[in-house]
Image (cartoon, rainbow, N blue to C red):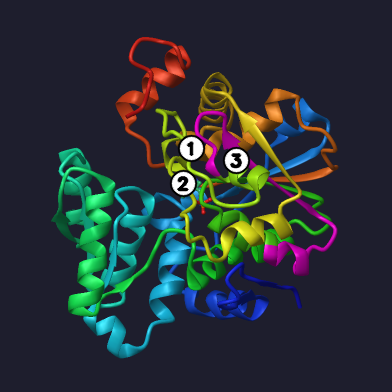
Amino acid sequence: MVAVMSATGSGLVTMRDVFAARHRLRGRARRTPLEVSPRLSAHTGRAVSLKLECEQATGSFKLRGAVSALAALSDDARRRGVVAASTGNHGRALAHAAREAGAQAVVCISELVPQNKVDALRELGADVRIAGASQDDAQLEVDRLVAEQGLSEIPPFDHRGVIAGQGTIGLEIAEDEPGVDTVLVPLSGGGLAAGIGLAVATAAPGARVIGVSMERGAAMAASLRAGRPVDVIEQRSLADSLGGGIGNDNRFTLSMVQAFVADVVLVSEAEIAAAMRYAYREERRVLEGAAAVGIAALMSGRMSELGDRVVVVASGRNVDMDAFTRVVAHGWDGPGAHIE
Ligand SMILES: *Cc1c(COP(=O)(O)O)cnc(C)c1O
């Protein structure tokens, strides 16, 4: 049994949590396919498979963490409802998971969030509250709702139930690709890498988990170097789902990534765009930028110590399709290819 003490000593995330999450996810989140990629295998001279979390309901793996965290709440807490400040894949996942669980999800956003994202969240049943002009203002509204109305905050990564939910991906990888020796995982706040790292350490011991982030604003990579959470300047990236910091009061993911992630590779915008094009044209898959970073790392040829049986986690497919078609047609510096 592998366990990691969080920096503040406030608890452990253990394999027991991951198995509990697997039980809770049954019938509520998909067991996604793991598919061999003949072309990536030929390109690298290794056996390369893709773990297709882009096929997950709501379009990203975030559903696992949201379902797991919601199911772990007491009936009473679930009745009061849950809240988060995410506009992206976590907000979508939480809205969907809450609706399925018969609970209300409140998603707090700033007035800068574009209307199409607001509409998408409302369509999934979220109660969207617009609060202030920044992400910080939205978070203040979350804090207020937690304090005054007793809602439970479900954050996107630094949460025991969320990490355990993402860890179920690691169990499935170990089962579907026995002998896996390398797992490439997109890395931002680190919930995905922490959960997969924990599960792989037990279920596929010896396999190396490698985090992949974009060069532009890789907060976890900077925090690993500093040995504590550090803020980085947020920049526009094709991998928009990998933006943001790891939280100054990080409890779980930094120490877990330190323990379970062997290396971090950074990829450029051009490499991400090339990987999105590749996935679309050769694999017939729509991947958002964040989900293509593992393929980008493989194709870059800069991976040292790559094993013989490689699994690449393709984490999601939520991308603006107009911007996507420009990227796959023209590459990252084509006309209007940048994704907001
Ligand atoms: C959130 C997200 C990630 C990164 O997950 P973390 O747990 O924050 O490291 C990667 N890919 C996609 C598609 C995401 O939505």
- What amino acid does circle 1 point to? Val
Say whether marks 1 and 3 touch (CB < 8 Å): yes
Residue 190 image position (x, y, % from top left): 56, 53
Residue at horizontal 78 percent and vertical 29 percent from the top = 44
- Magenta span has 75? no
Residue 247 image position (x, y, % from top left): 46, 54
- What amino acid does circle 2 point to? Gly
User: What's the distance in space between the residues labelled 3 and 2, CA to CA?
Assistant: 10 Å
Q: Earlier in the sequence, mark 1 or mark 3?
A: 3
User: What's the distance in space between the residues labelled 1 and 3, CA to CA?
Assistant: 8 Å
Which residue is disc 1 drawn over? 232
Mark 2 C-beta to ligand 1 under 8 Å: no
Tag 3's secondary structure? helix
- What amino acid does circle 3 point to? Ala
- Vertically, is 233 above or below 9? above
Q: Earlier in the sequence, mark 3 or mark 2?
A: 3
Left or right, 93 with reference to 68: left
Assign the N terminus to one quadrant of the image.
bottom right
- Which quadrant of the structure image shows residue 175? bottom right
Say whether marks 2 and 1 touch (CB < 8 Å): yes
Nearest the eye: 111 or 101: 111
Residue 245's disc number:
2
Q: Earlier in the sequence, mark 2 or mark 1?
A: 1
The span picked out in magenta is 198-219
Residue 141 image position (x, y, % from top left): 20, 61
- Magenta span has 210? yes
Task: Rate crowding at label 3 as few (under 14), some (14 to 19) or many (20 or more) other CA atoms within 10 Å.
Answer: some
Nearest the eye: 277 or 293: 293
Nearest the eye: 194 or 135: 135
Residue 147 image position (x, y, % from top left): 23, 75
- Vertically, is 145 above or below 222? below
